[in-house]
Amino acid sequence: MEFNRNQYFFLGVVIVLMGFQFRVVSEFVLTEDATQFLAERMHSSGADGAMAALSVGSQKVLHPPEWLGWCLISVGAVLILHSLAMPRPG
């Protein structure tokens, strides 16, 4: 499946908004169900990849790194600019 201009633009906007979300929020607290789901799937209690994790009781607190928000904003901006350079559909 090939993406057209509108799909690139939409994907870019969603990724930019996710980047802003990661820049504004300093931590995410998962519910007990989400923490249990991750524990069953990951089989580890250490750091979860790029995000540092801290267990508080039966809930997990995720601290995304500062660069993640900037990275998502940059990728989204490139996708938006790419969509504007493509020919219009139809």
Image: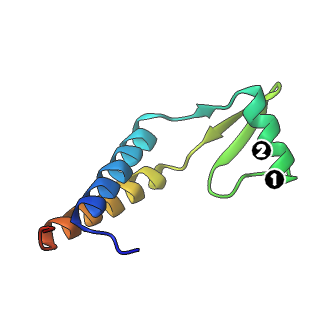
Residue that carries the numbered disc 2 in the rendered image: 38
Which residue is under mark 1? 42
Residues under labels 2 and 1: Cα distance?
A: 6 Å
The percent coordinates of residue 90 (x first, y second) are 13, 68
Q: Do the numbered discs 2 and 1 sit on residues whose CB atoms are within 8 Å?
A: yes
Secondary element at image label 2: helix
Residue at (63% x, 50% y) in the render: 51
Q: Position of residue 71 (x, y in %)?
A: 41, 59
**Which residue is at a point 41% across and 39% down the rendered structure image?**
21
Q: Is 53 left, or right, of 65 in this rendering?
A: right
**Closer to the camera in the image, 37 or 47:** 37
Label 2 environment density (alpha carbons within 10 Å; few <14, some 14–19, many ≥20): some
As drawn, the residue found furthest toward the front would be: 90
Position in image of residue 77 (x %, y %)? 26, 59
Mark 1 lies on a secondary structure that is helix
Question: What sort of colour scheme is used for the picture?
Answer: rainbow
Drawn side of residue 83 relative to residue 74, left or right: left
**The N terminus, quarter of image:** bottom left
The amino acid type, in three-letter code, at marker 1 is Met
